[in-house]
Amino acid sequence: MEIKITSLEHIDQAAQTFLAAVDLRDARRNVLAFYGKMGAGKTTFVKALCQALGVDDVVNSPTFAIVNEYDSAVLQSPIYHFDFYRIKTLDEAYNIGTDDYFYSGHPCFIEWPELIEPLLPETALRVEIEEQPDGTRLVRF
């Protein structure tokens, strides 16, 4: 499936469309791996998803913390948001307990998953965000 985000004013609608197509309550498909170049809009899209899921916390990229936990009023569960940009080795990622998070049954939103691909569950949903020449973004999954 493909969703086009024409501007930041339409990102909330894109997030709703995305969430309608993805069943985050299905523990077998709630690990989402967001691929895209620096500045493609991964964090911005995750923020929109969290807002649509009733997260009241400030949603930031966990670049230094590696993982942030948010409470979803809609799902009545935590959401885990990862940023593996600064991870140097698979062991480093594994040692923070990625298995515990990925197989917890709770949604996991992962930025820079290409750095830890061997640790991802086979059922992880690949989400690609690509900036187009006109500044719009395409979200493919």
Image (cartoon, grey):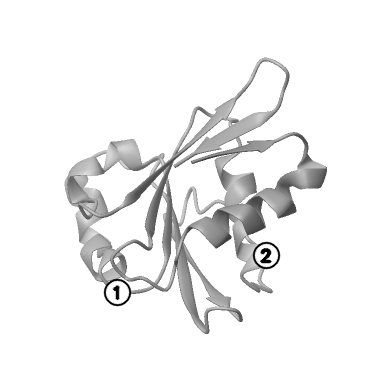
Q: Which residue is mark 1?
A: 104
Q: Residue at x 20, y 45 (%)?
A: 90
x%, y% of residue 98? Answer: 26, 61
Q: Amino acid at mark 1?
A: Ser
Q: Label 1's element?
A: loop
Q: Is residue 92 above or below residue 134?
A: below
Q: Nearer the viewer, residue 30 or 1?
A: 1
Judge whether residue 99 can be spotted in this image. yes
Labelled pair 2, 1 in contact (Cβ < 8 Å): no
Left/right of residue 80 with respect to residue 132 in the rendered view: left
Q: Residue at x 32, y 42 (%)?
A: 87
Q: Which residue is mark 2?
A: 51
**CA–CA distance in space, label 2 to label 1:** 22 Å
Q: Could you tell me which quadrant the C terminus lies in?
A: top left
Query: Could you say which quadrant of the image residue 25 lies in?
Result: bottom left
Q: Label 2's element?
A: helix
Q: Is residue 91 above or below residue 133?
A: below
Q: Nearer the viewer, residue 97 or 23?
A: 23
Circle 1 Cα neighbour tier, 10 Å, few/some/many (<14 / 14–19 / ≥20): some
x%, y% of residue 134? Answer: 73, 18
The count of marks equals 2
Left/right of residue 9 with respect to residue 91 in the rendered view: right
Left/right of residue 52 with respect to residue 114 in the rendered view: right
Circle 2 Cα neighbour tier, 10 Å, few/some/many (<14 / 14–19 / ≥20): many
